Image (cartoon, rainbow, N blue to C red):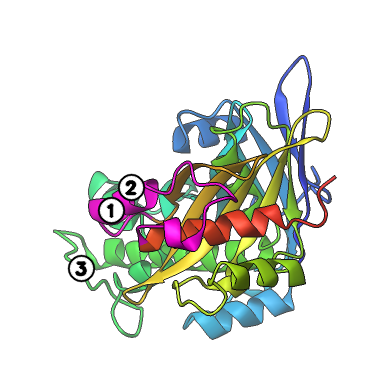
Amino acid sequence: MKLQPLLLFFSTIAVYVVIPAWAEAQAYCRLRDPITQIRTLYPESDAHRSIVRTVDMETRETVSESLPFDLHFNELGRHTLYVAQNEMRPLGVVHARTEKGSWGLIEIAWAIDFNMRIVGFEFQRCRSPEKKAVDSDYFRELVSNKTLDELRGLLSEDHTRLAVPRLSWSDAAEKLAVSSIQSAMKTLVVTENVWRDDLPVLSAFSNALPTFSAAVGIVPVNDVYTDRTHEILAEKDLAKTDLGIERSGVVVFRVQDVENAVIGYTVIMPWIYEGTTRQIVWNIDADHRVVNVKSATGWASKEIQTAFELAIGLSPETKAEDCSTFTQLIACEAIVVTSTDAGRG
C-alpha cells in the first residue's frame, strides 16, 4: 500500500486539509446538512473536508466476505467521507449510509474514529414510529466506542435479533435496532476498505499536530525497513530480538513545516501483547529523539503506559545495553526507522 502525502494550506476564510484525489463531487450517502451534523457528532469541530471515492463490486465482495449480509446493488457508486477538523487537526470521519426499512429508506450518519470504532450516530432520515426507542441514550451507549467485532457481539448468531436486553421495545423497534447495527457494521467495513489509503495519513497527522505545532504537511516514508535499517538493528542486537513489533505494519511519516523542512516523524507501530495488537504512536523530533508516545488503541494497563513513557528522551546514541526496560528497546527500533530515512531532503 503506497500512501499519499497530506498537505495543508491556509486561506483567510478557513483551514483546509487537502489530499490528492479529494473531490467535492456529487456522490451517494451525502450528509443533508454537513455543518450541523458534523458539529453535532464532533462538537469541537470547526471545519470539515470531504473525500469522494467509489464503492465498487470489489467492495461489495469484501462486505460479503466479512458480513452475513450484502451491499445492495444501488449502494454502489460514488460515496463521500467527511473529515471533521479542529484547528487543522483531523478528529475523525463521518460516513452516511442508507438502509431499507419498513417505513421507507433510513439514512444514518455514523461518526468513526481512526481506530475504526463507532463514535456516535445521527438519523438524518427515518419515518419509523419506533425511531424514538432506537434514537435513545441506551442505544447510543450500546453502539458507541464499538469495533466491528464488538458490534457483531450485539446481535444473535444469525444477525437477525439483538443479543442484549431490548428493554420494553416492540418487535418493530428491535428490528430497527438490528438494522441500525447492521448499518454500522457495513459502514465500518466499507470505510476501512474504500478509504484505506486516506485513513492512515489522517490518523498520523492527527497524532502529529499536537506535538509539532509548526506542521503543515505529512509525507509517508514508503521504504521503512531499508538495508541500512536492518544493519543498524543488527548492530544494536535488535534484528533478531522478538519485541512483539509487527514490522510489516509499521508506517513512518515525515512531518514538514511550511518550507517543506522535516521537523519530526510520527511512527505508528503495531505491537502485539498478550494476543492483542495495539497501535503504538511515537513522535520523534528532527534529531531522532523520542518526544512522546501513546497508544492509539488504549494502554493495556497504567504500568505498561509508564514503561513506554520511560523511553521519552531516548536518541540514536542510545545503545541496547543502556535500555533498562523492554519498552525502551521498542523505542530504539522506532528511532532507527526514522534515522535511516533515505528519502529525507
Name the residue tied to disc 3.
164
Name the residue tied to disc 2.
135
Three-letter code for the amino acid on which mark 1 is drawn = Phe
Q: Residues within 10 Å of mark 1 (few under 14, many from 20)?
A: some
Percent coordinates x, y for residue 217 in the rendering: 74, 38
Residue for point 50% across, 52% down: 281
Magenta region, main secondary structure? loop
Q: Earlier in the sequence, mark 2 or mark 3?
A: 2
Tag count: 3
Percent coordinates x, y for residue 309 in the rendering: 38, 46
For the N terminus, the quadrant is bottom right
Q: Is residue 320 magenta?
A: yes
Q: Earlier in the sequence, mark 3 or mark 1?
A: 1
Proximity of marks 2 and 1: CB atoms separated by less than 8 Å? yes
Name the residue tied to disc 1.
139
Percent coordinates x, y for residue 59 in the rendering: 67, 74
| Secondary structure at numbered mark 2 | loop
Residue range in magenta is: 298-325
Q: Nearer the viewer, mark 2 or mark 3?
A: 3
Proximity of marks 2 and 3: CB atoms separated by less than 8 Å? no
Residue 35 position by quadrant:
top right
Three-letter code for the amino acid on which mark 2 is drawn = Asp
Q: Nearer the viewer, mark 2 or mark 1?
A: 1
Judge whether 285 appears above or below 299 on screen.
above
